[in-house]
Amino acid sequence: MLSKNRITRRSFLKTSSAAGIAATGAGWGGGAVASSHLPDPQSVLDDISIEKYVRADYRELYGMSDSKPIWDESKDWIRTVDWEAARSELAGTTVRFPAAADAESAADGLAPFEALSGIKVELVPIPDDSMYDKVVAEFISGNASFDALQFFSPWMGDFAAPGFLYPLDDFAAKWGLPLDDFYDTYRLNYGFFNGQMYGIPFDCDIQMVHLRKGYMETLLDGPVDKVNSIPTYDELIRVSKELNKIEPGVAGVGLMAAPGFWSTYTWEHVSAQAGMMLFDENWEPIFNGDAGMKGLEIILELAKNANEGHAGAGWPENRAAWLGGQVATNISWQDSGTQAMRPDQSQIVDDFVTIYEPRIEGGRFAPPNIAGSTSCVSASAQNAEGAFLMLGFLTTASIMAMNEANANGVAPGYKSVLENPNLQEVSQPAKVWGDSLHHAWCSPRLPGAFPIEQAIGNEINRAVVGQISAKEALDNAAAAVRDIMAGNGFYQGSDPVEYASAEPGLYVGGGAPLPF
């Protein structure tokens, strides 16, 4: 069994519940009661509000209030679904749901769902650091202890291909889930596998480039232009060299180049701009071609100006260096821009800006949708429909918008949220982030995705530390990936994933006008 014992960005940040909800004392009692004694749904919905869910210091800092909504109520599923119908069909039933470190906060966050639906949520303890192994073992047993779960989105292939997940198409149609409000990259890659819906997007990530504003303004002798100040990766190399050691303890660029998936993510981020795709239509690895090489060569140049310890840096180290003011530019996730705004998390408040993705000559504008989480129902669920409704609640636009306002690292994937001007006021990267998602690149969701990420990243790290050349690294990785693919049923006449079904999600920007 492959070990998945690794720090995720969400577990590192210790979000306040398994659901990512920052419940702040909404005053709910425990447990659902009989349908006839349930509160009026509107009274419950009225309490799912900025005033009740967003931290008071953040509300004060940015003037957030319920009079300035950060979501569109007409697109917010919990405010459009027929809760009376849900109660009539499912009140009194139970949904079993894994809880990680903080079951008490998870229960608080789920109490309003219980009040809306009459469904009781039973929290099943599954430790974060062994979730993958535990979940797979229960799936294989055919007697999983949970009905619903949220997991790292690249694992979709591992869970969907063997039939471990419950198809959600009929539930989504019946209960009016607003799939059209999700950006295509999240809907296709976090929701669908082989053309069938198995997931609801949850933590919807993108990687971006962030700059320290003061340093850049000094270098530019003027304000930062989000499009033109660093239009290319060649310019980022030049700028990072000039900014390297601009003052003691500050490096020119922050990189995550630790062995394994961290290096893979950084390399995919840059290589996608060169037009890199991981596989051809026969699932043969092609990432060791010119585009993948260009991306790795750029990373090796940037590494000359990178933070100390970048060859061992993952998300926790990168986050600490960025928010602590130790790097002048940074390649990371979108929440590096949101969290940098918050004085309790950041030492660089008001001194940073998130820019549009730098380009590569001969490539394309392809901001990378990397990592993230999805929400799924177990194929052996005792209450599949109740589990779907609970997941719809947890991933609804209003709650996801308030997660972003709380800067807890759980990212919304809705157009109606990221394109909301009030949300953009409290999330500095949101405008660029939302614009970029119409052109997003994403890796395919395949069985064996994790060992594939590990194999590529281990070889890239060897190149970063100078053990092997860039060409050797990618050639070694391509050979290792082909072996992993073969071990998961590819190249034998009936691939477990149809390339044609995955292809639309791999790059959604073809033909779309650029946002600048």
Image (spheres, rainbow, N blue to C red):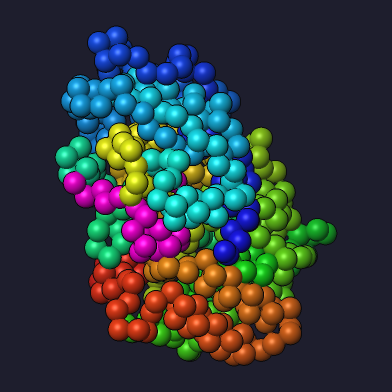
Residue 466 shown left or right of residue 236 in the figure: right
**100 relative to 110, above or below:** below
The quadrant holding residue 126 is: top right
Q: Is residue 513 visible?
A: no
**433 relative to 38, above or below:** below
Looking at the image, which residue is at 67% across and 53% down? 316
Q: Is residue 482 visible?
A: yes
Residue 198 shown left or right of residue 2 in the figure: left
Looking at the image, which residue is at 73% across and 78% down? 465
Region in magenta:
149-170
439 or 472, which is in the foreground? 472
The quadrant holding residue 333 is: bottom right
512 or 471, which is in the foreground? 471
52 or 229, which is in the foreground? 52
**16 relative to 368, above or below:** above
Q: Is residue 156 magenta?
A: yes
251 or 345, which is in the foreground? 345
Q: Position of residue 10 (x, y in %)?
A: 56, 46
**Number of numbered discs on residues:** 0
Q: Position of residue 244 (x, y in %)?
A: 73, 67
For this orientation, the residue located farthest to the right is: 248
Query: Which quadrant: the C terminus?
Result: bottom left
Q: Position of residue 16 (x, y in %)?
A: 56, 33
For this orientation, the residue located farthest to the top is: 37
